[in-house]
Image (cartoon, coloured by chain):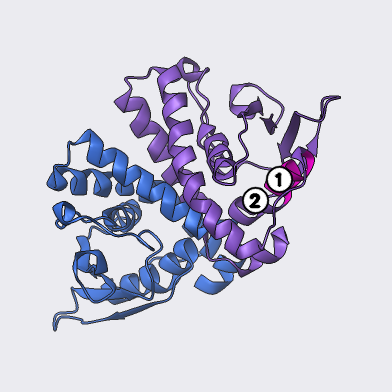
Chain colours: A purple, B blue
């Protein structure tokens, strides 16, 4: 249903989105005088607010029902949510034995396309807003998660992957 | 060619874009302590920077050649540029007799969808970034324009329209 909802949804150009998102990050870096730790928190919290609002649209467009367990939740976030909002493919894996923690690998990351960071921002979690969006959206359906970047190409990682637990 | 380029381009969900853009506006309002005049200028200048970078993508994807006159420029901005980046339809009209000034009416405005502004922001040009994008993109191809909202539904206007001169 992720792909069907994606086809039916209004869209804008991804590069415009990337540059607009980059403008936010620059502005927040400026506001917090390059204190990367604060910037990461702020981006996460901006994402949280967006996620709280996006979830309504998500529920309306995908007729998703309550997930039975955390595995199902992770699959819906990855296969329906990320597809519907970013138009990207994902893989869910790296489950811990308890089934309480996994990693969602993104085929691409439209928030950070073509972005390069200077050395002084090496601890910046540039795309942190996305983790906040997921956290906010799930919070609205009473699922409390921790969401963080497991791999981030901008910080030397191999591609982009989000840890959900 | 606007529609063909739009079909071929990477996209993201328009509501995610709208909410992300809204987060910028809120942040800038906060930074400038609700001084709406400064906020309008800042949004315009952020847009200018984005336009300067988007124009490369635009030229690559649309194989647009140099415009013969201002009428052609306005048509390309409206029919190719706004279609490619926002996926929207537009009409160009309200030309002055000299052919140096026109109005581009937008079918919809993805920057401001579902946005409502409190009374204290009635002079806020919420979508001003878009005018900056157009100005920046044209500046990069040596066309200097003034670009402003002619009609803005958020400020009581009948729909959304951009004046280009």
- Figure quadrant of residue A59: bottom right
Residue B35 position, x and y percent, is: 13, 42
Residue at image mark 1: A78
Q: Is residue B11 magenta?
A: no
Residue B152 position, x and y percent, is: 23, 67
Q: Nearer the viewer, residue A51 or A21?
A: A51
**Residue B1 visible here:** no
Q: Residue at x 68, y 58 (%)?
A: A64
**Residue B126 visible here:** yes
Q: Residue at x 48, y 32 (%)?
A: A44
Q: Nearer the viewer, residue B79 or B16?
A: B16
Whether pointer 1 and pointer 2 mark residues with C-beta atoms closer than 8 Å, the reply is yes
Q: Nearer the viewer, residue B64 or B148?
A: B148
In the rendered view, tell whether residue B85 sits above or below residue A28. Answer: below
The chain holding disc 1 is: A
Q: Is residue A77 magenta?
A: yes
Determine the residue located farthest toward the right in the rendered image. Answer: A97
Task: Please state, as top left, top right, bottom left or bottom right, where the N terminus of chain A lies in the image.
Answer: bottom right
Q: Is residue A9 left or right of residue A78?
A: left
Residue B165 position, x and y percent, is: 19, 67
Question: How many marks can you see?
Answer: 2
Q: Is residue B30 left or right of residue B77?
A: left
Q: Is residue B7 left or right of residue B72?
A: right
Residue at image mark 2: A81
Task: Please state, as top left, top right, bottom left or bottom right, where the C terminus of chain A lies in the image.
Answer: top right
Residue A89: assigned label: none
The residue segment tinted magenta is A71-79
Residue B124 position, x and y percent, is: 19, 54
Distance in Å between CA atoms under marks 1 and 2: 6 Å
């Amino acid at each position: 249903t992720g792909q069907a909802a994606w086809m039916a949804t209004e869209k804008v150009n991804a590069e415009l989105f990337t540059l607009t998102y980059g403008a936010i990050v620059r502005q927040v870096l400026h506001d917090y005088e390059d204190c990367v730790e604060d910037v990461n928190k702020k981006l996460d919290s901006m994402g949280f607010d967006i996620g709280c609002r996006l979830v309504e649209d998500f529920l309306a467009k995908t007729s998703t029902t309550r997930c039975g367990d955390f595995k199902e939740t992770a699959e819906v976030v990855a296969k329906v949510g990320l597809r519907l909002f970013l138009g990207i493919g994902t893989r869910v894996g790296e489950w811990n034995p308890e089934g309480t923690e996994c990693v969602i690998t993104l085929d691409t990351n439209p928030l950070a396309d073509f972005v390069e960071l200077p050395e002084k921002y090496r601890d910046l979690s540039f795309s942190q807003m996305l983790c906040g969006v997921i956290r906010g959206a799930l919070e609205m359906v009473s699922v409390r998660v921790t969401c963080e970047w497991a791999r981030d190409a901008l910080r030397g990682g191999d591609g982009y992957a989000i840890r959900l637990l």
